[in-house]
Structure formats: C-alpha cells, structure tokens
Amino acid sequence: METLILVLHVLAALTIIGLVLLQHGKGADMGAAFGGGASGSLFGATGSANFLSRITAAAAAIFFVTSLGLTWYSSHNTEGKGVMATQPASQQPLTTPATTPAPVPATDKPVVDADSKAKDIPK
C-alpha cells in the first residue's frame, strides 16, 4: 500500500511541475491582446489558462492527500524497518572484555637499562 501511495505522490509532483511550466505568466495576456496568437489555440483565449489551472489544482490536491497518507502510514508502521531502527536498551547484549590485562608488578627500583646508566655517570 505504501508503494502505491508513493508512486501516486511522485506522479502528482511531476504533473505539478510540468503544468506550472506550461502555464503563461500574468504578462502573457497583454501580448495576446495585441495579436499574440493565443486566441487561435485549442482552448481559446482564456480557456487554456482556466483548464491548466484546474488540472494543476487537482494535481495539488492529489499531492496533498498522498502526503497526508504517507505521513499517516509511516506513523502507524510498527515493523521497525529503516536506517534508524534500533533495539531498546534492555534488549541490547552486554559487552565484556574477552580477557583482563595482567597486573604490572610493582618494584622499588626504577627500571633503567645499562646503557643509559653509563651515560649519566660523570667521569
């Protein structure tokens, strides 16, 4: 069901984009008054603007309804799928180190190698 709503949503969005690009701006009516050729079109002088605006409004309504449908579906989806799906803290396994490090024996004498001792002795 979610896939069907998503396909309708994308198709409505693409339809809105196409219809908005086809429509004339407000300044196009002035050019039609002086023989711009709009009166000889398929829908008449004002018919295309009215037809395209109604189809655009219908596509916008479909886009709005599918947006609400996708929102409702995602909020009521209990499958827990997705990138952010995690287990609750009570169900996560506890991690413990595989081995504990051996304690270092403490000595009273500082560890110094023979070479450094020979360099530090004044002659």
Image: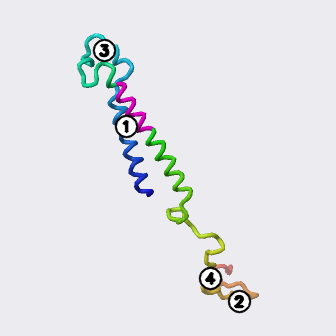
Query: Magenta: predominant secondary structure element?
Result: helix
Single out the mark in the foreground, 3 or 2.
3
96 is higher (above) or lower (below) than 57: below
Single out the mark in the foreground, 4 or 2.
4
Question: Picture coordinates of residue 84 (x, y %)?
Answer: 54, 62
Label 4 close to label 2 by CB (< 8 Å): no
Q: What range is drawn magenta here?
A: 49-60
For the point 35% across and 34% down, the residue is 19
- Mark 1, other Cα within 10 Å: few <14 / some 14–19 / many ≥20: few
Q: Earlier in the sequence, mark 4 or mark 2?
A: 4
Spatial CA distance of label 1 from label 3 is 24 Å
On screen, residue 112 versus residue 44, left or right, reads right
Residue lying at the far right in this picture: please name it.
108
Amino acid type, residue under disc 4 in the picture: Pro
Q: Earlier in the sequence, mark 1 or mark 4?
A: 1
Residue that badge 2 annotates: 105
Magenta stretch containing residue 120, yes or no? no
Amino acid type, residue under disc 2 in the picture: Pro
Q: Earlier in the sequence, mark 3 or mark 2?
A: 3
Quarter of the image for residue 18 reads top left
Question: Picture coordinates of residue 79 (x, y %)?
Answer: 52, 66
Q: Please tell me the numbered disc located at residue 17.
A: 1
Amino acid type, residue under disc 3 in the picture: Gly
Q: Earlier in the sequence, mark 2 or mark 1?
A: 1
Q: Please tell me the numbered disc located at residue 31.
A: 3
